[in-house]
Image: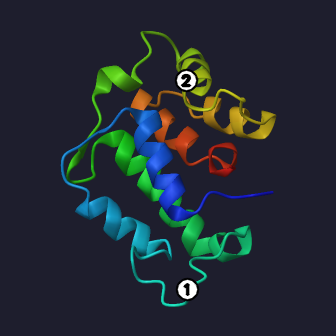
Amino acid sequence: MKVKTPLEFVASAVRASGADVTDARDLARRIGEMGMPLYMQQPPTGYKDTSEAWVSTSGLLARLNLALDLAAGRIRGAGVSASALAPGAGDSASTATALESRLVPAGLSESTRHTVEGESGLDPARVAGLILGSPEFQRR
């Protein structure tokens, strides 16, 4: 399984969420915290392209935190409008289904879907953050 590099993950999360980025410094700092500081790779071969380089407890936690913060509008310089993430009125399950089809067109696994839909009463931003942080969104 190929996992997105931190840069690929942040770029795809920003794109999928419809965020309006006016200042990318906080996003660049977060990419560095995930182990891929921009323009800091010394060897000419560049950053590793394998999942072992990016999949770790701290790396996955940083990805989930970024996804939740991005969806909630807590990243300086990257605004996400609530209307972009709110597919309409409904219960948590219908919100999760609508966001799933928008953010992960290939679909979520049954266990991820069960986890997201099992969180009753979550606001759409939290559901979007959980989906952006899901294993399915992490894959290339």
- Residue depicted at x 48% and y 10%: 90
Q: Is residue 4 left or right of residue 65?
A: right
Residue 83 appearing in the image: yes
- Residue depicted at x 62% and y 44%: 137
Mark 1 surroundings: few (<14), some (14-19) or many (≥20) residues within 10 A: few
In the rendered view, would you say 11 is above or below 51? above
Mark 2 surroundings: few (<14), some (14-19) or many (≥20) residues within 10 A: some
- Residue depicted at x 78% and y 36%: 109
Q: CA distance from mark 2 to mark 1?
A: 37 Å
Mark positioned earlier in the residue sequence (2 or 1): 1
In the rendered view, would you say 71 is above or below 92? below
Secondary structure found at label 2: helix
Residue 83 in picture, x, y percent from top left: 31, 20
As rendered, which of 21 and 92 lies closer to the eye? 21
Give the residue at mark 2. Answer: 102
Three-letter code for the amino acid on which mark 1 is drawn: Pro
The numbered disc on residue 44 is 1
